Amino acid sequence: MTDSRSVLIANRGEIAVRVNKACRELGIKTIQVYSDADIDSLAVKMSDEAIRIGPAVSAKSYLNIDNILAAAKSSGADAIHPGYGFLAENSEFASAVESSGIKFLGPSSQAIKLLGDKVSARELVSSLNVATVPGSDGRVSDLSHAQVLAKDIGFPLMIKASAGGGGRGIRPVYTGDDLSRYFPQASAEALASFGDGGLYIEKYIASARHIEVQILGDGETYLHLFERDCSLQRRRQKVWEEAPATCLSDETRKGMCDSALKICQAVRYRGAGTVEFLYDTNSEDYYFLEMNTRIQVEHPVTEMVTGIDIVKEMICVGFGGKLSLKQNELKMTGHAIECRINAEDPSKDFMPWPGTISKISFPEQSGVRFDSMLFEGYEVPPFYDSLLGKLIVYDQDRSRAIDKLKHVLDKFIIEGIPTTVRLHEKLVNDGDVIAGRVDIEFLEKWLLEQF
Amino acid sequence: MSKKQIMSPLPGTFYRKPSPDSENFKNDGDSVEIDDVVGLAEVMKSFHEIKSTVSGGKIQFLIEDGDAIMPGQVIAEVE
């Protein structure tokens, strides 16, 4: 039977390539939108049809809802895949797609809106008895208010500037005396740095890992595809991801995965999604951080250990299909590691640097996957994210996966522009990384001290 | 009077002000000193200040806010 369905891919880069591939394997026609900067991109070359949606600047192309909807209508697309980033978690976009009669390959716009708002997501999650990081839930008016809250939450605490972000304006406090001393100081600093002296406080988890659960839903059936450990981060950007998280006990893993499923059930989730948790390695407690209502960059590590093609599944359920899998048929086998390859110079404070790829080669062997948008001669444009691709290795256990990664990185060549390949070469040979002795603060300290 | 040029060292998107609600770093007709910030270049979602490499008067911008720039492209001229 020939499939007459078509999907418009409202994204670019490696994820557009990934979605094109999945559609092709499903026999679905692809319509790739592009900006002026992406006319020669791999996703455009791979697609069945390509439509220009505007100039290079993303506000006028990949973020332009009207232009994307016009492209979908003129091409007669049956569905839109939003990828990640850009409009993927924009509930207005999802709602506009829904009311145009085109299928949005993701959850309902209401679910996106509810889970995308920090306050409403925390409320929902708390009502399901899933823990969130204990804190002030908003601004702390003054020192005496802070002292009352500190009694409840317990030390150590973090004082954070309401207007801060990306790790700025954060100060850990360990005692009540610390709090009395630093609270006014932090407020003054916040006022000076951000023009807003507002502070909030949160429990400080000294050695925390970022663990997230992959889920799939069709609005009736909900499955978890176990977890990923994404603790190696720089400026809150993930750099290296693994599945499974070998630090978890079976009991904690089950608790986390069940918590993720409860959230999906509560919003009748449809599509692929990720529930992110902060995991306290000392107490083994975990706290809900947020839910991402889209496909994630690091989905391949889960695909490698479960054998499930997550992108194909999300397309099928997005078209109204039902999940054919059962939870008790799913299991994790082996270990997978993903390294994000960015167009950044690690020796120059990760300065992004676009340019032309003159050479690319890596060992093609079983258990090695490179999801990317690159080809020799490709000119990486300066207008978008610096992610070029993801190198994923798989083997029967973590130590073999590490060995394979060492070998593959050694032979991995991208010439023409600086990339983060060299960072990964150093990481994979680091004793703490090899032993898995890392937390979410590890990478930034390591970069200062050892890189 | 000869004109001196300020060129972009980076490829990306050029902005004339630090944030959408702010004033321009420099307006046409202003004078500039070496190392004065004349704009921002957004390269792959990270922002970098573009500083003047020349000094002079009556700056004239050749690039609009939000336009694409390439390395070596002339952003502005001063007298």
Image: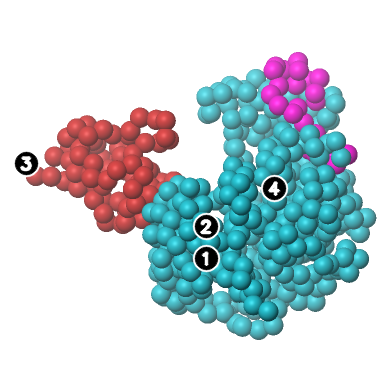
Chain colours: A cyan, B red
Residue matched to label 4: A108
Report how far apart the C-alphas of labels 1 and 2 lie in the structure: 8 Å
Disc 2 secondary structure class? helix
Residue matched to label 3: B1
Relative to A328, A426 lies left or right:
left
Q: In the image, residue A68 lies at what x, y percent?
A: 50, 53
Disc 3 secondary structure class? loop
Q: Chain of mark 4?
A: A
- Looking at the image, residue A309 lies above or below residue B44: below
Q: Residue at x 61, y 52 (%)?
A: A101
Residue matched to label 1: A31
* Quadrant showing the N terminus of chain A: bottom right
**Marks 1 and 2 in Cβ contact (< 8 Å):** yes
From the viewer's perspective, is the residue at label 4 or at label 2 nearer? 2
Disc 4 secondary structure class? loop
Residue under disc 1 on the same chain as residue under disc 4:
yes
Frontmost residue, A2 versus A225: A2
- Please state which amino acid type lies under the numbered disc 2: Ala
Frontmost residue, A388 versus A181: A388
Q: Earlier in the sequence, mark 1 or mark 2?
A: 1
Residue under disc 1 on the same chain as residue under disc 2:
yes
Q: Chain of mark 2?
A: A
From the viewer's perspective, is the residue at label 1 or at label 3 nearer? 1
Residue under disc 1 on the same chain as residue under disc 3:
no
Residue matched to label 2: A72
Q: Which residues are magenta?
A: A129-150
Frontmost residue, A450 versus A377: A377
Q: Residues within 10 Å of mark 3 (few under 14, many from 20)?
A: few
